[in-house]
Image (cartoon, rainbow, N blue to C red):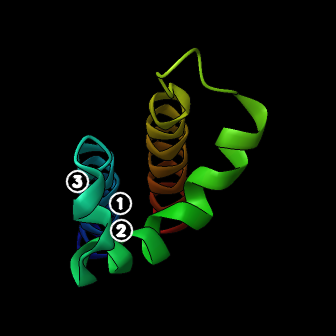
Amino acid sequence: MYSIISIVDTIFQIYFWLIFAYILMSWVPQMRETPVGELLGKLVEPYLRPFRKIIPPIGMIDISPIVAFFALDFIREGLKTVLRFLFL
């Protein structure tokens, strides 16, 4: 049981860091044009896009990734709770 929960937790942590790296890449626009940047965009943009539609940027600052981080953590904790409940 704990191995399933730890695998799920690890997957969410990896995705968190992928989003974080993608956000940092936005500070250097040329980075998104690299193969790594394009790969990260394909992995991360489908998750960030709905948040960007709901929360518009404030000037030059896009706060939607912060909300996306909270939502990702909420989903992760909820999924871990469900898995604990199912396997007890």
Determine the CA span between mark 3 and mark 1. Answer: 14 Å
Residue visible at 43% across and 41% down in the picture: 73
What crowding class fits label 3: few (fewer than 14 Cα within 10 Å), some (14-19), or many (20 or more)? Answer: some
Picture coordinates of residue 69, whole percent (x, y): 44, 38
Residue 21: numbered disc: 3
Secondary structure beneath dot 2 equals: helix
State the residue position of label 1.
Answer: 12
The residue most toward the right is 54
At horizontal 27% and vertical 47% (from top left) the residue drawn is 20
Instruction: Give the residue drawn at x 30%, y 53%.
Output: 29
Image depth: mark 3 or mark 1 in front: 3
Give the image location of residue 35, x and y in percent.
26, 84
Mark 3 vs mark 2: which is more N-terminal?
A: 2
Image marks 3 and 1: residues in contact by CB distance under 8 Å: no
Residue 14 visible in the displayed image = no
- Of badges 3 and 2, the one in the foreground is 3
Q: Which mark is residue 49?
A: none
Q: Amino acid at mark 3?
A: Ala
- Which disc number belongs to residue 8? 2
Image quarter where the N terminus lies is: bottom left
- Pointers 2 and 1 in contact (CB under 8 A)? yes
Q: Amino acid at mark 1?
A: Phe
